[in-house]
Image (cartoon, rainbow, N blue to C red):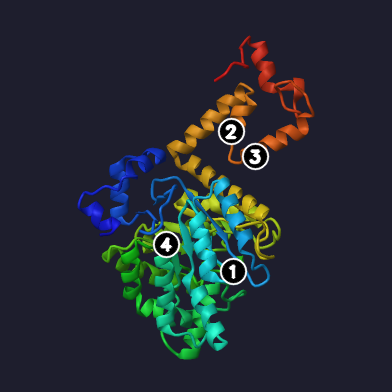
């Protein structure tokens, strides 16, 4: 029996009370959100998680980190380092997007080390295995796609990106659109190539109920991928993107009817003035399903700094209602991220998520900001650093510029610290412990 069926019968998972307490919400609110499909709990029956995650309405905005090998960097051990680094700096989930090496072995080693939910994109492995067998993607067999999905499910994958919205109808819309960057989704491109060559409908769409059976069996959360997402500002919010979103909305309904948890993925590259409309469209068309966005990136010119452009867009998207931010690293558009890039990407996305949570009135976020502010007023560096998003970097930054000074103030203000001066003038003791 799956989570949805259990909740309908009044059977509460053991960890729900703890999760609700951490999220600062009532247990009933959490249960109702899952039953409505506005909250998901990605956890495979075979993956024992030390840090289970709930994603959706009324909760803290969550962050995902992508890792995985590539043709030029097929080093599994480096991906394990990235996994551990991402978890260390607070990612809520991780996705393995590996495309080189022994994909089964890599995924299983990551799953073994991951204390947070792990996601994958099964069409990657299905396409790569087809290339190894036949020399191309377009001869891939439909059954092979579902065999890979079930294989990954048996391993314990918690959520899967499924590009089921790329249909013959949406392709027709794409063919009539004069896009600048065309198709930038790798999974979308694999399926489009197959569909055009075979002259057939996308099997992930046509056999969606088959997918639901596997998902229900292993308690997989489906993440409906946006294979036609815009790859630049000029392509944002165009007809192919919206046409696909409409299809995804229909699939959300079907998944819910079958007791399968589902989230919806979104763009991508979106100008600031279009972010609110994109979030509201998803929430309306997909009936409140949790929204998982890549960024969004608000400009295309920030090569080497796309974790910043992504954080700007992510903060706005989360404020308007997006529930789940996929990080973007500084090396986006340039190459596979390093371990340090992963750290930078996760921290930037967490800052964006936290900023949005503050604006939305999230109790947990407000409590954290209020506490660190009190310690800042009292010039308590140790407490400030412990409450910061990246304590390691904060500690290093303070140490580097203090240069052995024992004074309680920082090297920027020294004896001219505004809070210290005013406190002394007013006769207020500031250096007491909070």
Instruction: Write down the residue under mark 1.
Output: 231
- Element assignment for label 3: helix
How much space separates mark 2 and mark 4, taking CA atoms? 34 Å
Which residue appears at 33% of the width and 45% of the height?
A: 16
How much space separates mark 1 and mark 4, taking CA atoms? 31 Å
How much space separates mark 1 and mark 3, taking CA atoms? 34 Å
Instruction: Write down the residue under mark 4.
Output: 156
Label 4 Cα crowd, 10 Å radius (few <14 / some 14-19 / many 20+) = many
Kindly give the residue lying farthest to the top in the view shown. Answer: 427
1 vs 3, front mark: 3
1 vs 2, front mark: 2
- The quadrant holding residue 272 is bottom right
Which residue appears at 32% of the width and 63% of the height?
A: 260
Instruction: Write down the residue under mark 3.
Output: 392
- Element assignment for label 4: loop
Labels 2 and 4 touching (C-beta < 8 A): no
In this rendering, does residue 202 appear at all? no
Q: Quick one: label 3 or label 2, which is nearer the N terminus?
A: 2
Instruction: Write down the residue under mark 2.
Output: 386
Label 3 Cα crowd, 10 Å radius (few <14 / some 14-19 / many 20+) = few
Where residue 353 sits: x, y (%)?
Answer: 52, 47
Which residue appears at 38% of the width and 50% of the height?
A: 57
How much space separates mark 1 and mark 2, taking CA atoms? 38 Å
Kindly give the residue lying farthest to the left in the view shown. Answer: 9
How much space separates mark 3 and mark 2, taking CA atoms? 9 Å
Label 2 Cα crowd, 10 Å radius (few <14 / some 14-19 / many 20+) = some
């Amino acid at each position: 029996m799956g989570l949805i069926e259990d909740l309908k019968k009044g059977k509460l998972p053991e960890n729900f009370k703890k999760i609700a307490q951490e999220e600062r919400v009532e247990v009933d609110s959490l249960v109702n959100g899952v039953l409505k499909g506005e909250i998901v709990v990605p956890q495979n029956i075979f993956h024992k998680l030390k840090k289970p995650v709930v994603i959706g309405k009324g909760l803290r905005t969550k962050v995902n980190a992508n890792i995985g090998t590539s043709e030029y960097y097929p080093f599994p051990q480096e991906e394990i380092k990235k996994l551990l680094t991402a978890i260390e700096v607070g990612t809520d989930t991780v996705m393995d997007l590996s495309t080189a090496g022994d994909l089964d072995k890599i995924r299983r080693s990551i799953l073994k080390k991951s204390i947070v939910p792990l996601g994958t994109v099964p069409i990657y492995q299905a396409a790569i295995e087809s290339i190894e067998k036949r020399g191309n993607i377009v001869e891939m067999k439909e059954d092979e796609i579902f065999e890979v999905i079930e294989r990954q499910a048996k391993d314990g994958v918690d959520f899967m990106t499924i590009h089921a919205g790329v249909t013959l109808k949406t392709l027709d819309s794409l063919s009539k659109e004069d896009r600048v960057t065309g198709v930038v989704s790798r999974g979308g491109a694999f399926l489009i190539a197959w569909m055009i060559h075979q002259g057939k409908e996308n099997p992930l769409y046509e056999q969606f109920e088959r997918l639901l059976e596997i998902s229900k069996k292993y308690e997989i959360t489906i993440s409906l991928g946006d294979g036609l997402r815009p790859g630049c500002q000029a392509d944002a919010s165009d007809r192919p993107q919206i046409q696909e979103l409409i299809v995804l909305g229909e699939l959300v309904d079907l998944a819910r009817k079958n007791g399968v948890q589902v989230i919806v993925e979104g763009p991508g590259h979106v100008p600031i003035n279009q972010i609110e409309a994109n979030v509201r469209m998803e929430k309306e068309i997909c009936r409140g399903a949790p929204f998982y966005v890549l960024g969004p990136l608000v400009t295309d010119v920030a090569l080497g700094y796309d974790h910043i452009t992504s954080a700007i867009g992510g903060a706005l998207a989360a404020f308007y209602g997006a529930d789940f931010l996929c990080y973007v690293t500084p090396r986006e558009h340039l190459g596979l991220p390093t371990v340090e890039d992963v750290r930078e990407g996760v921290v930037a996305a967490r800052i964006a998520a936290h900023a949005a949570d503050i604006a939305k009135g999230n109790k947990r976020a407000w409590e954290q900001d209020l506490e660190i502010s009190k310690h800042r007023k009292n010039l308590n560096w140790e407490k400030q650093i412990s409450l910061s998003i990246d304590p390691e970097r904060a500690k290093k930054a303070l140490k580097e510029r203090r240069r052995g000074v024992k004074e309680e103030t920082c090297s920027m203000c020294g004896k001219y610290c505004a809070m210290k001066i005013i406190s002394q003038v007013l006769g207020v003791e500031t250096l007491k412990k909070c």
